[in-house]
């Protein structure tokens, strides 16, 4: 439904040369008196069997108090990464792409001028294996190059768990004064 409506809005924006925005947050069934809120088909961190204790991120429950880290609020890499993570949920047809862009945003925090060095520093400081980062690179690259590659819920969850974990590990890395490498289990 979201994709279909998005296609119509994008087409209208194209024809009228407008940056139209739309939101489809929920659908309410008046007869049943219930509302379905759109997010992801499943809960991203409900099943962590694939990565087990290598995932150090845990979701904050709605209604819980969220501490704001001032360093992160002004960190452009973190801001870009969280923007892309939200988009990985909002645009399910492009989850891999947005997760990859979130990770690349964090990579730029380590070395924006030398991509190879930035990846090396990200992996070393956040204890992330190259294979983990590249586990969905092919589908993300396809999406980046305009190929509409389908992803199952399990594939989307895989991408999101990795991206969220990398961004979370970056927050822990930044907590150090000065930032320092993590002692987390290698992912």
Image (tube, rainbow, N blue to C red):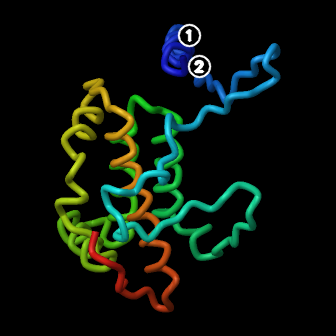
Mark before the other along the chain sequence, 2 or 1: 1
Residue at the image point whose x is 53% and y is 35% from the top: 90
Is residue 186 shown above or below 52? below
Residue 18 disc label: 2
Disc 2, SS: loop
In the rendered structure, the answer to whether residue 77 lies left or right of residue 22 reads left
Disc 1, SS: helix
Q: Nearer the viewer, residue 118 or 67?
A: 67
Residue 182 image point, x, y percent: 37, 83
Q: Nearer the viewer, residue 30 or 77?
A: 30
Of marks 2 and 1, the one in the foreground: 1
The answer to which image quadrant residue 107 occupies is bottom left
Residue 53 image point, x, y percent: 37, 70
Residue at the image point whose x is 27% and y is 66% from the top: 113
Q: Which residue is denoted by mark 1 in the rendering? A: 12
Disc 2 and disc 1 in contact, CB within 8 angstroms: yes
Quarter of the image with the C terminus is bottom left
Quarter of the image with the N terminus is top right
Residue 138 image point, x, y percent: 19, 41
In the rendered structure, the answer to whether residue 61 lies left or right of residue 46 reads right
Q: Nearer the viewer, residue 84 or 111?
A: 84
Instruction: Using a 10 Å C-alpha cutoff, classify the residue at mark 2 as few (fewer than 14 neighbours), some (14 to 19) or many (20 or more).
Output: few
Is residue 165 shown above or below 30? below
Residue at the image point whose x is 21% and y is 72% from the top: 120
């Amino acid at each position: 439904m979201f994709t279909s409506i998005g296609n119509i809005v994008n087409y209208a924006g194209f024809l009228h040369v407008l940056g139209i925005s739309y939101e489809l947050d929920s659908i309410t069934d008046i007869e049943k008196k219930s509302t379905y809120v759109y997010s992801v088909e499943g809960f991203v961190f409900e099943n962590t069997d694939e990565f087990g204790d290598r995932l150090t991120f845990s979701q904050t429950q709605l209604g819980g108090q969220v501490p704001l880290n001032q360093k992160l609020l002004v960190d452009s890499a973190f801001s870009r990464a969280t923007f892309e993570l939200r988009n990985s949920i909002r645009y399910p047809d492009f989850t891999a792409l947005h997760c990859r862009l979130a990770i690349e945003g964090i990579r730029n925090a380590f070395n924006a001028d030398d991509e190879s060095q930035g990846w090396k520093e990200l992996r070393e400081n956040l204890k992330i294996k190259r294979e983990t980062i590249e586990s969905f690179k092919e589908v993300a690259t396809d999406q980046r190059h305009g190929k509409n590659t389908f992803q199952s819920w399990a594939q989307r969850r895989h991408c999101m768990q990795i991206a969220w974990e990398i961004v979370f590990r970056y927050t822990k890395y930044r907590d150090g004064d000065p930032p320092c490498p993590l002692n987390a289990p290698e992912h």
